[in-house]
Image: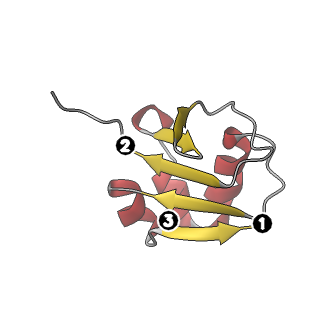
Amino acid sequence: MIEVLYFAWVRERVGVPRERLETQAATVADLITELAAKEERYAWAFADLTSLRVALDQDLSSFDAPLAGVREVAFFPPMTGG
């Protein structure tokens, strides 16, 4: 079981702030493929990965990162600020 968190416009598109999922995904990219296939709202949220970031157990990560042992995946837009 994995906890998936959505922030900012990702949460708005998906419609929920978090969910617990059973997944067979080996990597973040595999998880995104599974999520995008669930419903149109997920496909819309994950349509442009260039405007998306991911953190695994609160550490910034990449889409090819393995999910083995990961308890939390968070998706959010790039951070800006100064």
Identify which residue is drawn at 51% across, 59% down. Answer: 5
> Is residue 66 shown above or below 20?
above
Reading the image, the residue beneath label 2 is 77
Number of marks in the image? 3
Q: Quadrant of the N terminus?
A: bottom right
Identify which residue is drawn at 44% across, 68% down. Answer: 17
Label 3 secondary element: helix
Identify which residue is drawn at 53% across, 41% down. Answer: 55
Residue 72 placement, left or right of 27: left
Residue 7 horizontal/vertical position (percent): 39, 56
Question: Which numbered dot is residue 75?
Answer: none
Q: Quadrant of the C terminus?
A: top left
Cβ atoms under marks 2 and 1 closer than 8 Å: no
The amino acid marked with disc number 1 is Glu
Classify mark 2: residues with Cα within 10 Å, few (<14), some (14-19) or many (20+): some
> Is residue 52 shown above or below 1?
above
Cα separation between marks 2 and 3: 16 Å
Cα separation between marks 3 and 1: 19 Å
**First in residue order: circle 2 vs circle 3:** 3
Residue 4 placement, left or right of 30: left
Q: Nearer the viewer, residue 29 or 1?
A: 1
Residue 47 horizontal/vertical position (percent): 50, 46
Reading the image, the residue beneath label 1 is 22
Residue 71 horizontal/vertical position (percent): 68, 55
Label 1 secondary element: loop
